[in-house]
Image: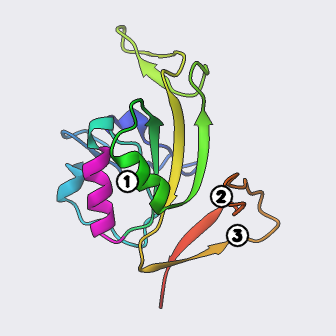
Amino acid sequence: MSLDSNAQQIDIKGEILRHFTSFFKPHSSGVNVFAQTISAAENTYVFPPFSLVGPLLRFLRESELCFTIVVPKLYPLPFWWPILISRSHARLQLGSKRDLGILLFPSRNASFVTRPLPWDLFAFRVASGKYTFFSLSPSVRTTQNLETGRPMSTMCLSQR
């Protein structure tokens, strides 16, 4: 993420999820995610600038983390697309090309506007070899991955 405004709030106190920016921001946890140590206990979520998807995938894989990444389906397909397809255990399409209201884009007057998506947008859940998966209880609403039939509400836990 590059802006504090992109960070999601997690509770009624308004605590912001840990996030890293390209330069210092008041609420960021640091600068340059590649220079950070990310705990395996964290549920890592990334929505990187598209030019950094490849290097970020390598960094997260080498860090042996489970993570969720949000990326567009660009054409021609970038080199990292088949890597994500093969390494992910769940995929969810968040929006289709020309959908409105999926993302907010910055505008010239410092506010945000909705625009049609220029591409299909996906979230992938990727695991490292150090972690196992379990599904949440059946009482939790889950979305199924249409390709594998596995629930999307799969979580990653460290082996003991």
Q: Write down the residue under mark 2.
A: 152
Image quadrant occupied by the N terminus: top left
Element at badge 3?
loop
Q: Which mark is residue 18?
A: 1
**Residue 71 at what x, y percent from top left?**
44, 40
Question: Of circles 3 and 1, which is in front?
Answer: 3
Residue type highlighted by circle 2: Met
Q: Could you classify mark 2 by the number of other residues whose Cα lies within 10 Å: few (under 14), some (14-19), or many (20 or more)?
A: many
**Residue 145 at what x, y percent from top left?**
67, 54
Element at badge 1?
loop
| Gap between marks 2 and 1 measured at Cα | 23 Å
Question: Of circles 2 and 1, which is in front?
Answer: 2
| Residue at 39% across, 12% down | 107
Residue 128 appears left or right of 93: left
| Gap between marks 3 and 1 measured at Cα | 24 Å
User: Mostly what secondary structure, the magenta segment?
Assistant: helix
Residue type highlighted by circle 3: Leu
> Pointers 2 and 3 in contact (CB under 8 A)?
no
Task: Say whether residue 59 is magenta.
Answer: yes
Q: Which residues are magenta?
A: 53-64
Residue 152 appears left or right of 52: right
Q: Write down the residue under mark 3.
A: 136
| Residue at 35% across, 39% down | 78
Q: Could you classify mark 3 by the number of other residues whose Cα lies within 10 Å: few (under 14), some (14-19), or many (20 or more)?
A: some
**Among the two numbered marks 3 and 1 on one chain, the one whose residue lies closer to the N terminus:** 1
**Residue 129 at what x, y percent from top left?**
42, 77
